[in-house]
Image (cartoon, coloured by chain):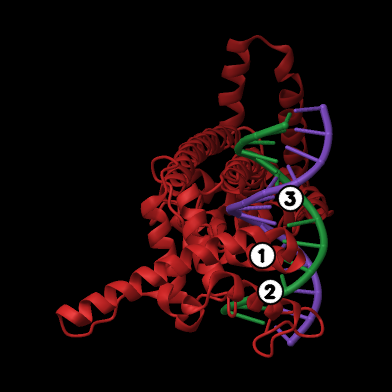
Chain colours: A red, B purple, C green
Amino acid sequence: MDEQARIMQTLGGVNLSGHPGQGGMTLPPPHGHDGTDVDGRKQDIGDILHQIMTITDQSLDEAQAKKHGLNCHRMKPALFSVLCEIKEKTGLSIRGAQEEEPPDPQLMRLDNMLLAEGVAGPEKGGGAAAAAAAAAASGGAAGDNSIEHSDYRAKLTQIRQIYHTELEKYEQACNEFTTHVMNLLREQSRTRPISPKEIERMVNIIHRKFSSIQMQLKQSTCEAVMILRSRFLDARRKRRNFSKQATEILNEYFYSHLSNPYPSEEAKEELAKKCSITVSQGVGTTITVSQVSNWFGNKRIRYKKNIGKFQEEANLYAAKTAVNAAHAVAAAVQNSQTNSPTTPNSGFQMKDEEFQLDSAENKNTLLTNMFTGGYSAPCYQSDGRIQ
DNA sequence: TTGCATGATTTCTT
DNA sequence: AAGAAATCATGCAA
């Protein structure tokens, strides 16, 4: 620190005569009051410059000794001050051209992405927000499969850890290198003119270099996240057929509600629950509400597009529900004979009482008519939409 | 390998 | 926001 202060002092106040001046470069007057003094100074400067110029021709020991001598020379501060001023002037003109660069947009993009993915930024959650974001991006069905979800999070945490370790390493290396260079420059400032601004500039250069290395790290981290994310989403996209039982439950509901095949949110939940119980496709496989919605969406559109093709299926399920209804009625009758009257069936399956009591065939014709427009309400509109 | 079935996603409409 | 329609991508039987 005293070195720096000394340099500042040299820069700010010391002139060639060795006395404090008004600041800035103060050359001796061309016609000094004392001619012999001026001549002496000139000789001194010539002498010191000669010594500096020849120092490289000498052996290390000789140079070392000479260096000490130069440091103690009475004209040294003055010469040092002049050199500093000259350097500062040239340095300023160079710096004007290379500094004040705007923030790198690519770096900003990378930073934003890492922040959004939960890799950079505060530790909390460890990418839970990112997983949720990925879930939201991949549509309603996402975010329900906890196995894939936790897998994604685990991998993201891994990436996060690697990223932070590497970043820390880079920062440490950067600091070490900066300290080293600063020490070196301070050391050198004893023998050559180095201003604090120059040191600062050098530090900036080092930081820029290290941030460009950091950018590479950020870039590869982003790539890793993108790969993980695409894999995660691809895995979700992989289609697996529902089990036969699940399809049966959904079909039963669909054909028994053909007049209005739009299950409410509660009904969807119920169906999802029911399907999940019967599904046996593997560990962790469940049918979600959004999958039920997908299924009904697909079913409605495909049924509407080709009613003929689904006729057989419709008959089958209508017969099935009719049988169920008959059983239910029989049970109800039996109940009414033995106990007080109770509701034979609960839940969505028996909502459409009128439908249940029709004969399978009649009902199908009726419902087919509904879809083809031969039934008053609800039916497809002129543009083909239901309702 | 091919064609159909089917779950999921995307885009558009209401 | 929910649903329709189109499309994608995969499963599966022939």
In the picture, the disc for residue A55 is none
Residue at x-position 76% and y-position 85%: A381
Q: Could you tell whether A79 is left or right of A148 in the image?
A: right
Instruction: Kindly report the distance in space between the C-alpha atoms of the residues bearing marks 3 and 1.
Output: 18 Å
Label 1: which secondary element? loop
What amino acid type is highlighted by mark number 3? Glu
In the picture, the disc for residue A88 is 3
Instruction: Say which label, 1 or 2, has the lower sequence index.
Output: 1
Q: Could you tell whether A278 is left or right of A382 in the image?
A: left
Q: Residues within 10 Å of mark 2 (few under 14, many from 20)?
A: many
Residue A292 appears in view: no
Q: The residue marked by circle 3 belongs to what chain?
A: A
Instruction: Kindly report the distance in space between the C-alpha atoms of the residues bearing marks 1 and 2.
Output: 104 Å
Mark 3 touching mark 1, by CB under 8 A?
no
Q: Residues within 10 Å of mark 3 (few under 14, many from 20)?
A: some
Q: The residue marked by circle 1 belongs to what chain?
A: A
Residue A260 place in picture, x, y as percent: 58, 80
Residue at x-position 75% and y-position 77%: A372
Foreground mark, 3 or 2?
2
Residue A281 place in picture, x, y as percent: 45, 42
Instruction: Say which label, 3 or 1, has the lower sequence index.
Output: 1
Foreground mark, 3 or 1?
3
Residue A64 appears in view: yes
Residue assigned mark 2: A368
In the picture, the disc for residue A22 is 1
Residue C9 place in picture, x, y as percent: 70, 44
Instruction: Kindly report the distance in space between the C-alpha atoms of the residues bearing marks 3 and 2.
Output: 92 Å
Instruction: Between residue A270 and residue A168, name the one nearer to us.
Output: A270
Instruction: Say which label, 3 or 2, has the lower sequence index.
Output: 3
Task: Say if labels 1 and 2 share a chain.
Answer: yes
What amino acid type is highlighted by mark number 1? Gln
